[in-house]
Amino acid sequence: MKHTAMKKLILFYTILTLLLLLLVNVFLPHYLSEQIIAEKKNELNAYSHYILDTHYETVSDAYTIYNKKTITARIAETDNILNVRTWIFHANGDLILDSGNESYIENSFNILTEHPHYFEAYYHVNDSVKTLLSETMLSVILPVSEQLQIKGYIVIHYPIHAIAKSVSTYITLANSFLILLMIAFLLGMLLTYRITIHPLKKLTHYVMQINKGEYVEQPTISKRSDFNRLQLELTYMKEKIENLDEYQKNFIANVSHDFRSPLTSIKGYAVAMSDGTIPPELHDKYLNVIITEVERLTKLTTNLLSLNQFEQKGYQLDLTSFDINLVLRQTATSFEGTCKQKHIKLKLIFSEKETYVTADKSKIQQVLYNLLDNAIKFSHKDSEIHLKTIEKKEKVLISVKDFGIGIPKSGLNKIWDRFYKTDLSRGKDKKGTGLGLSITKEIISAHNETINVTSTEGAGTEFTFTLTLTTPNNV
């Protein structure tokens, strides 16, 4: 079984915690002990110099007027505060003063008798002077000299157990910190699992089931979770995938239908002309029908390629600055013959004589052609179609409005779908592919512009799209 991220994280923190515990309880005590001893040596050395400056002369003077007990008591007061013990020796090793024993009789103990080499080191860590010491001490020795002659020694003792206690305190604090750290880590892991890992596992399982094509219920994730938005997006994706097969079936059915009808006509007329069913004198008539059906197939194929090009985001717009009013006039002119046949009047309404926009001119011509072609198809005889441009701040509103059959409310949100034709249009739009408005929508979207439609059934339809205003020759 593969290690999950959670298991790896737990393993990492477990190893890290064990290493820290080993460090704190094995290596740290030794390090702290050395550091504290070094610090205490400096403190004791400084204190021995204080004793030298303030009390040594008085203590070593055989004719001092002060009682030795009085001096010993004064030193003992300071020693008790600092938790130390002071010895003062003559150069010959006789003990003059012991702050730990105020009733000590001067010169009744000679350290060199028991420890001949005691003064050869500057410090000791031992309890070898068992006659006077009952515990292990850190002892710092300060030789007192005058004119290169040793007059005596000052020895300051600090109990080792106090150092051990300090080390123990630091270790206890460090272990307490580690325990708190471990508790925080466990709480963090629990929180991470509930907030991140658990919902992520749900979503991963959800996606895996979707990939397998299996049915799976939507996972339950709290709305307060950061993964809630991801869940919604995955649910939306799942719905799109579920609808994909149906969409593909409908797409293939629509394409097949639109290809089959003209192909059937072409084959039927070609066979009829070939076997003599259609006499030679009628061949020209039916050849024109075949040409019309071929043109219909060509248009359908071209439209499908155009849509695919836009969907793949591979089409590069050729942006130029041009007069949209002029393009409207040119497009309207191309429909003059059709309009005369249906007695439809094209009315051009411009807010300005010239209105320059930045866009792909050929694609905008295609948009206008599609919209105007639709407007003419679904307009009544002896009616009007209005082509308008209105400048509004940095935009131009271009509209194509007819007064024809209109679009039912139920169909307004479907008109941009491929191959969609309203029930009202099916009887009139015999040659349409159902792709014109889809292509129109893609072109306007590629320009980062908007297109809207308003329609009333039986009263007419108006399509309005926007373009960006510019100055002549400014792209």
Image: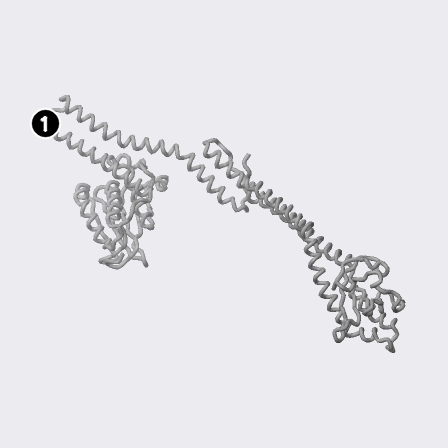
Residue pointed to by mark 1: 281
Whether residue 105 appears in this view of the structure is: yes
Q: Relative to 394, does residue 312 appear above or below in the rendering?
A: above
Place residue 357 in its image quadrant.
Answer: bottom left
- Frontmost residue, 315 versus 399: 315
Mark 1: secondary structure: helix
Quadrant the N terminus occupies: top right
Residue 465, percent from left and from top: 31, 50
Amino acid type at image mark 1: Glu
Q: Is residue 233 left or right of residue 373?
A: right
Residue 168, percent from left and from top: 73, 54
| Residue in view at x 20 percent, y 51 percent | 329
Q: Relative to 59, does residue 248 appear above or below in the rendering?
A: above
Q: Is residue 40 left or right of residue 447?
A: right
Place residue 211 in its image quadrant.
Answer: top left
Q: How many marks?
A: 1
- Frontmost residue, 425 versus 183: 183
